[in-house]
Amino acid sequence: MTIRPLLNSLILSKLPHIGTTVFVAMSQLAQQVGAINLGQGFPDFSCDPRLIVAMTEAMQAGHNQYAPMAGILALREAVVENVAALYGHRYETAHEVTITAGATQAIQTALTAIVHAGDEVIIFEPVFDSYEPVIRMNGGMPVYAKLRYPNYRPDWAEVRALITPRTRAIMINSPHNPTATLLSADDMHELANLLRDTQIILISDEVYEHMVFDGVKHESVARYPELVERAFVISSFGKTYHVTGWKIAYCLAPKALMQEFRKTHQFAVFSVHTPSQYAIAAFMQYATHLTLASFYEAKRDYFLAKVAPSRLQWLPSKGSYFVTARYAGIDEYRELDDVTFAAHLTRQHGVACIPLSAFYHDAFDESAVRFCFAKKETTLAEAAERLVKI
Ligand code: GLN
């Protein structure tokens, strides 16, 4: 009888305004009502069978104890070679690469390593939902720059105006979740101009780096030496190799930054699942990332062709495996907030999506929802058929 009040008084929430993530909520709803889940971003097809073989072989070879804290050497070497080949910067294997338990952990660890109480961190809204709570848990203050409909381009003059002596870091994300837009070379130069002569650290979330469409190249921070020297660059094996459930990613940073990162990393997870690291290190020789853009571009085109007759307004998807759509033009729905619309679509029409307001601290509502097209053609066709009927 007395337990509840006691517990209530013991728990002073560090995140009083935060519930369970929208991705979990929408996946649960989809499951409950048997809807096709185009909400949470993950593939509904299997990974390359060679990767499963490599995982089995790693376990059978006895790679089942703790990996080195920073990750196994072979995987860090493979990452260094890949990044050097793609973007021209050669990170140091020993000191500048760390394997993490997913990109969300890498972001959490990078922020925890550098944010002090009272520090400000500039983030761009709409923004992936983990950034802001982690900044706050470290005593920091998120400062919001806006990416605005319809192009969702950063306004660098606006960003410049947000910089104060307390700005510790700025976070970028390209290809961007949820808007599927890209930072351009011009953006990267503007960013470099902005950061020059400051002490601001850059955190670059590049988990969709290999999903850049229409022949455009990914503007990794690793292409820009001036940015590299102040940056954490984060990418995801889970997304690149269709194994989001393996929860494995990596972080790159110059030695001094990585040293701080590892201090935090070792007490967060110590090290990451060993057989996955061996499996991915072995599998990387097939260089499947080189065909990932065309693989997902074909899925995007397939899905967008099928949904073209629908009454939703589809925004361009230039990268990532997401596409957003607006329903403001549909008379019977225009008055609905996006959370209600997403729930309605899931329950009544059997297609789950993510409301864009989940990516804004003030639940800003632009009558838009995000769909994930990392699905089999049969799934996309069935979902499209339902969407065309609304
Ligand atoms: N990155 C994925 C998305 O945006 C979800 C990750 C998660 O569920 N935490 O859908």
Image: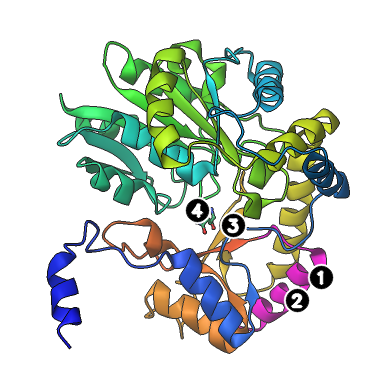
The label nearer to you, 3 versus 1, is: 1
Helix, strand or loop at label 2? It is helix
Res 51 seen here: yes
Residue 188 tag number: none
Residue at the image point whose x is 66% and y is 16% from the top: 84
State the SS at label 3. Answer: strand
Is residue 52 toward the left or the right of residue 206 in the image?
right
Q: Quadrant of the C terminus?
A: bottom right
Label 4: element kind: loop
Answer with mark 1 or mark 4, whichever residue precedes in sequence.
4
Q: Which residue is mark 3?
A: 323
Which region of the structure is painted magenta?
A: 373-390
Point 79% across, 57% down: residue: 46
Inspect the magenta stretch and tell me whether residue 388 lies in it.
Answer: yes
Which residue: 46% across, 43% down?
105
Residue that numbered label 1 is attached to: 378
Q: Amino acid at mark 4?
A: Pro
Foreground: 326 or 343?
343
Amino acid at dot 2: Glu
Pointer 2 or 4: first along the chain: 4
Q: Residue placed at 73% from the left, 41% from the top?
A: 293
Hey, what amino acid is under mark 3? Val
Spatial CA span between label 2 and label 4: 22 Å
Q: Quadrant of residue 11 in the image?
A: bottom left
Q: Is residue 260 above or below residue 60?
A: above
Quarter that holds the N terminus? bottom left
- Within 8 Å of ligand 1, the CB of disc 4? yes
